Image (cartoon, coloured by chain):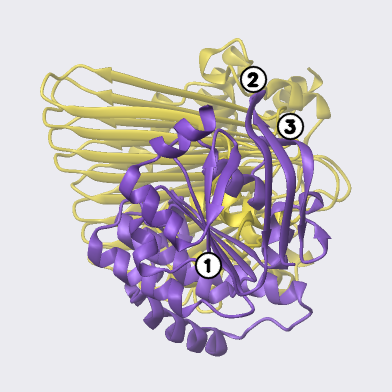
Amino acid sequence: MMLSIKNIHANIDGKEILKGINLDIKAGEVHAIMGPNGSGKSTLASVLAGREEYEVTEGTVTFLDQNLLDLSIEDRARAGLFLAFQYPVEIPGVSTTNFIKAAVNEKRKYQGKEPLDALAFLKIMKEKMALVEIDQSLLSRSINEGFSGGEKKRNEIFQMAMLEPKLAILDETDSGLDIDALRIVANGINQLRNQNRAILLITHYQRLLDYIQPDFVHVLYNGRIVKSGSKALALELEEKGYDFITEETDL
Amino acid sequence: MTNIAYFKDQFEDIAEPDSAIREITKTAFDTFNQLGLPTYKLEEWKYTNISSLFDKNYQFSKDNFQDKLSPSDLQALNLAGEEEAHALYFINGRFAAGLSKINATENELVVLPLQEAAKGPYQKIIAEHLGSSSKYLKDGLHALNTAFIQDGVFIYLPKGKQLALPLYLHHINHADTENVLSQPRSLVYLAENTNLQLIETYTTLGSMESFSNEVMEIVLQENAYLAYYKLQNDGPNAAQVSSTQIHQLGKSYVQTLTIALNGGVIRNNLNLILEAEGNETHLYGLSLLKGNSHVDHHTLVDNKRPNCFSNQLYKGIADDTATGVFSGRIIVQRDAQKTNAYQSSKNIILSDRATINAKPQLEILADDVKCSHGCTVGQLDEEAMFYLRARGIPLKEAESLLLRGFAADILDQIKLKPLRKHIEQLILAHLAST
């Protein structure tokens, strides 16, 4: 098992958002978590990535045989967990290329490998750039500064390609994208799909799943996974809206 | 305050009755006697306590140590890219003419001991400009420097000379046997159509206390260009009050950049007097303070004529128990219509015990001007920290990246590439050490 979430409860500012989540993900699988606004989707992503304002009050998360919750934010990343941000942060004065190079080399250090020299890094970068159709000029700019919404999301997937995570959590990667940008981003993600890597897609809408076919779909509502199924569940949600789930659950 | 009595004693000893600048020094000494050392009770010195430092019994150095420094000692002070440049040395506040390294003819660059220049063909310039900053800097320390002008330097760029190589001014304090008070003094004159890149550094050798009370006066005539970089990276035993007054007499361009990394108590007074229509001035500052450092940037931009442009951007980072001060004053005189004057101070505090004081002041007497000022004091962006760490970058390194990012737009202003690289490396090491 790559990731095993057992009965996770999490609070922010004393308010319980996650109320007992259970989820197992194996290598090679793509899981989609869907749910209405405020159901706890992004909280789940944040808890897994280690965002410090969330307090886990109960439950365990095992990631590649390690207790994930014991690891620092950076160690989670270096162990192979990647979070594509819903709102990628703009960081003035720090060049995107230098940042990604630092991140790649931190990961290599963690794995006991030598850092990449400038040439080797450049070569890998060129390869991965093609994957998400991202331009060199964008990468020489400060991190996400003045990037359009689509450029920010492509930059996230580009970083995923560079860091080659074991588990990628994509938090609302489709939000704010027009149809062309969505196609490019989804295409990049599909190329990064392989049998050693797991992907957790977090999305409000079905439309991302038209491009990326998940193996499993889970519906998160009020801090719990209330329904799990195949791709067909996403289509059912699209057709009937979240109401049919919420009504069922609230009964 | 035993030091005051000592100064009075010394004044009689040191003063040369036949000095060409005797009148100036005499008047300044009287002013010093009246004012004494500035205390925090004065509004301008509210945040920086200088007078208590003088309990340390600083001594004027009798020796200028010129012979004790080997070429390799001097070379050790070189900054990256300096090998080819011009270099002047002040040792214990006294200009050491014998150590000067000038790669230009006298037609291109004149460097003379101040006393000597005051007697020769530059007499008129010196009479007119030496001490002109006392009109703006009315405090005892400034007067003390003027009273004891001994071995100052006069730097002169003749008409039309564009000095291609930068000029480095290194201040060295030899504080290995006693507490040293140094009082460097310089007058820099840029005639019409000239170009100068000036870099000042400060180094204290030895572990006794040193105090540098510096005054520099710079005059720019029509179409002169000055880039002026000050790098303060001295030991915690080194206190410093550094006053620079720049008179833009003709329509000219000035860029200043003050970088404070290490030191004890530092106070910088930087005055820009815009005397001609259409003057342009850019003032940048960066403080990266930790330990118990205290850096106080005081700026003044006095707009006297119409159509002048000035922009100030000062950034500060304070960690541990460090204190940063930015006090920026802009005056727009009645005649200075169409002035554009901007000022911004941005600060990050990294520790609960660090302090930043920011105090912008605008005095506008003209009615058709564009002026703005703004100050921010905040912490490292937590969201940005999380973003970097979520990519595997460790906490310390993420902090360093963000702080370097914060400083980047200031460092981008350093036009001399090797100097910029040098300072970037210093900052990297500075942020990495605890």
Q: Nearer the viewer, residue B23 or B74?
A: B74
Q: Toward which corner of the image does residue B353 lie, by quadrant?
A: top right
Q: Nearer the viewer, residue B69 or B318?
A: B318
Confirm whether circles 1 and 3 share one chain: no
State the quadrant of the N terminus of chain B: top right
Residue at 37% x, 75% y is A187
Question: Which mark, by number, is residue B321?
Answer: 3
**Label whose residue precedes the other's in the sequence (2 or 3):** 2
Which hue belongs to chain B? yellow
Percent of width and height locating residue B171:
63, 54
SS under mark 2: loop
- Chain ID for label 1? A
Q: How much space separates mark 1 and mark 2, taking CA atoms?
A: 78 Å
Question: Which mark, by number, is residue B37?
Answer: 2
Determine which residue is flagged by label 1: A215
Judge depth for marks 1 and 2 and give the one in front.
Answer: 1
Q: How much space separates mark 1 and mark 3, taking CA atoms?
A: 55 Å
Q: Nearer the viewer, residue A174 or B36?
A: A174
Confirm whether circles 2 and 3 share one chain: yes
